[in-house]
Every structure is written in structure tokens, then in C-alpha cells.
Image (cartoon, helix red, strand yellow):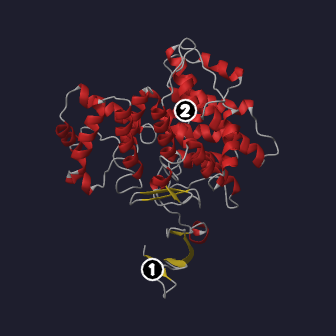
Amino acid sequence: METKILYTDVKLPESPSVVKISINDKEFIAPVLVGTEGEKALDIRELRKQTGFITYDPGFANTGSCKSAITFIDEEGILRYRGIPIEDLAGKATFLEVAFLLLNSKLPTENELREFELGILRRMALHEDLKNQFHVYPRDAHPMSILASMVASLAAFYPEKPSGNDESEDYKNYLRLIAKFPTIAAYSFKKSIGHPFIYPRQDYGYCENFLYMMFSHPSCNYEILPEVVEALELLFILHADHEQNCSTSTARLVRSSQANIFAAVTAAICALWGPRHGGANEAVISMLSFIRDNKIPVKNFVERVKNKEFRLMGFGHRVYKSYDPRAKIIKDACHRLLKKLNKEDELLSIALELEEAALHDEYFIERKLYPNVDFYSGIMYRAMGIPTKAFTVMFALGRLPGWLAHIREFDKDPDNKIGRPRQIYVGSNVTSYTPLSER
């Protein structure tokens, strides 16, 4: 079957307003959509209706599911939130300032930020009945399973009104989720070590409260170090959003069914859990520990990766074909944090040696495999005392404002529809039923 693609705008073939697709005797006129950064897309919403064809795109690598004004990323190593480069936000803004930016499309004024922060700090405590649910989990339960189930349970305590589409009530739920995430995360850790829960304090900031609830104890107070707070703010900001990744698109997809906000966020948490997504920083630590514990020379490990004996975790990205801009920032921050805390980490030395070897090896250069955000973040979390099993929870804490911003944007989109991909069926043709006695 011959398929031809022709530009109808002959004056500007590199940037047509529409594209004519000829499939045998049928033609399809696809409008061209152009984003503010020059990305081009073919609007194929009527393709199947007019031609009987659909597109085939495993993993949706070339499929735009929506228009979004939240985050821009580019394969050359660009990341911007609402147009602001990540380099301008990291180390300058607070995490809640960035959360406000993502949710509200602009940086807050002093009064707006103060009101936003108070709205969150006042909601950090959990309902006592919800808090009691922690006691049903085994002590060795993975904190991501606790986080997902507890967030789902929030829907029972803060049900959406039957009328729906209540923006003011939705916004309160955004604040509740941002507020209660660190409390749930801290309590899941306390449960795992058999320590009593610590209530949040309104005289502490957001990150200070998380550290206080994680590591304080009724018999001895935890000293909240400004260096650790600064590092935590930075990590949360770098994780706050990253366009249509697996967990974010999951949140949008679940919300498209008009499921409640807590259900959409729970689904995003579960999507983040996997080692191909948010679980990668945990996998990086496991890889570095394996190299250390087995005394494998880094050059030997790299060769075994090339022979496909091992996977090189924390390298490569679905979009970036150069150095992940977040990894550059985290690498420098990791050195600063360990120096300030006067700590040495053998895993950091291995990571640096591994990065150096990979960046100068043609195998990785040809495949455009560079360190991503997960490569150094786990080492920073280790330095703070965060247990390895909780690394993905930390990722979720940072990514939450992005999920909520996308849910909010989806709700306001006049073109939003329930997500329902097509498929290419490759199973059996029509087959008769065989009675059980004849099988």
C-alpha cells in the first residue's frame, strides 16, 4: 500500500499550517499545531474517522496527549517551570514557592506566599482515625505501599461534593495533599522502626517539619541543620515537575475518568514506584553498593554493562540526549552537602569514577547516555539519614505539586476527554466455542 505525505502550504514547507496525508484514494488534512518553543504536532483527532487508520506508537514516544503550559523540557538539557529555567529556581526559591508557581501559573507575592504556606502548615496534622491506620501495616512494609494506600484513604475523610467541578474545594484538596504527604511519609518511617509519631509544628517550615517528624523523638529533640534543609528544598524543587512522564500522565489519565483527586494522585504514586521511573534512585544505590561490596573495579563493571551483564542505573533519559540539567545541579549540591556535614561516602567516589568512565566511553557517547536526576540524589538522601527504601517516597514528595498542577490544568482544559488509547489487535480470528466435553 502506497502512502504519501504532501505539504499543502508550498510557500513554507518547513512550517506548514496543515499537512495533507494521502492514503490510496483517501486524503486527510491534518492541522499543524505549534507550541511556544516551536514544537510541531499534527492534529490527528479525525484520522481514524476519515481514513480508517490509527497511529501505532508504543510508549507514546511521539504522541502528544495534551497542550500544557506548565513545564518545558528539551533534549539538549533544558528544563523550565512556567518559563523559568530550573537553574534560576534551584537554590533561590523555596519548594512551596515553586509549588505555588506550578499550581497558579505565576510566582507568588509575599502575601500570597505567606497565605499559601499557612494554608499548608495548618493542614499537616493527620486526622486521628487516619493516623490509627498505620498500626495495621507490618513494620517491614514498603513505604510506597503505605503512602499510596493512605493517600487513597484521604478520599474517605475529604470526599468531593456530588456537584463536582468545585474549584475552591479542589484547591483545598491540593493544599491538604501537599500538607499531609510529608506527615504520611514520616509516619511510615516511624512505624518501620517502632518509634512514636511526632506531630508537626506550625512554627517550623515545610522541610523543617518533615525532618522533625522523621527524626525527632519525645526523649531527645532532633537538631534541624540548615544545610540539610537547604539540600532537601533543592531536591524537592528539582523533582517538582517533568512534563508528561509516566506518573504525571497517569494522574491525568485517571482524572480523565472524573475520579477524585486523591485517586488520581494515588495512581501517580503507584506509577512512580517502578524502577524505570521514581524507583531508579533506589536502584542506583543498590548498583553502587553491589560494586563496593563485591570489590568490582569500575572499568570492569563498565565493560560488563556493555556486554549486557549488568544495567547501568541512573544513566540515560527518555527525552534528554545530553546531560540532565538536574543532575548537574545535584552533583554540585551533593559535594557541598557532604562537605558541610563533614561526611565521606564511598558510594559517591564510586559514582564519580563510574560517571567519568562512562562519559569517555564511545559506547555510551554514541547512545547519548548521560547521568540523570537519579544518579546522585540517593547519595544526598543517604547523607540526610533517609533510608534507601524511602527514596522513592522522597521523589513523590517533590513531584506532588507537578501532579496537582497537571490535574488542575486538565480540569480547566475545554478539550479534555476520558483517556482511551486504541490498539492493533493481533490475536486469533473468530473461533467457535468448543464444549467442555469435547476438549
Q: Which quarter of the picture shows residue 187?
A: top right
Asked if 189 appears above or below 275 in the picture, the reply is above
Disc 1 to disc 2, C-alpha distance: 62 Å
The amino acid on which the numbered mark 1 sits, given as a three-letter code, is Glu
Find numbered disc 2 in the image and state the secondary structure of the residue it sits on. helix
The residue that appears at 30% across and 41% down in the rendered structure is 312
Comes first in the chain, label 1 or label 2: 1
Give the labeled residue for mark 2: 436
Q: Closer to the camera, 177 or 58?
A: 177
Residue 174 in the image: state x and y as whole percent. Answer: 67, 42
The residue that appears at 53% across and 38% down in the rendered structure is 396
The residue that appears at 60% across and 34% down in the rendered structure is 205
Q: Closer to the camera, 196 or 138?
A: 196
Q: How many labels does the image show?
A: 2
Neighbourhood count class around disc 2 (C-alpha, 10 Å): few under 14, some 14–19, many 20 upward:
few
Q: Which of marks 1 and 2 is in front?
A: 1
205 left or right of 301 in image? right
Find numbered disc 1 in the image and state the secondary structure of the residue it sits on. loop
The amino acid on which the numbered mark 2 sits, given as a three-letter code, is Leu
Quadrant in the picture for the N terminus: bottom left
Give the labeled residue for mark 1: 14
Q: Can residue 23 be seen by looking at this rendering?
A: no
Q: Can residue 106 be seen by looking at this rendering?
A: yes
Q: Which quarter of the picture shows residue 44?
A: bottom right
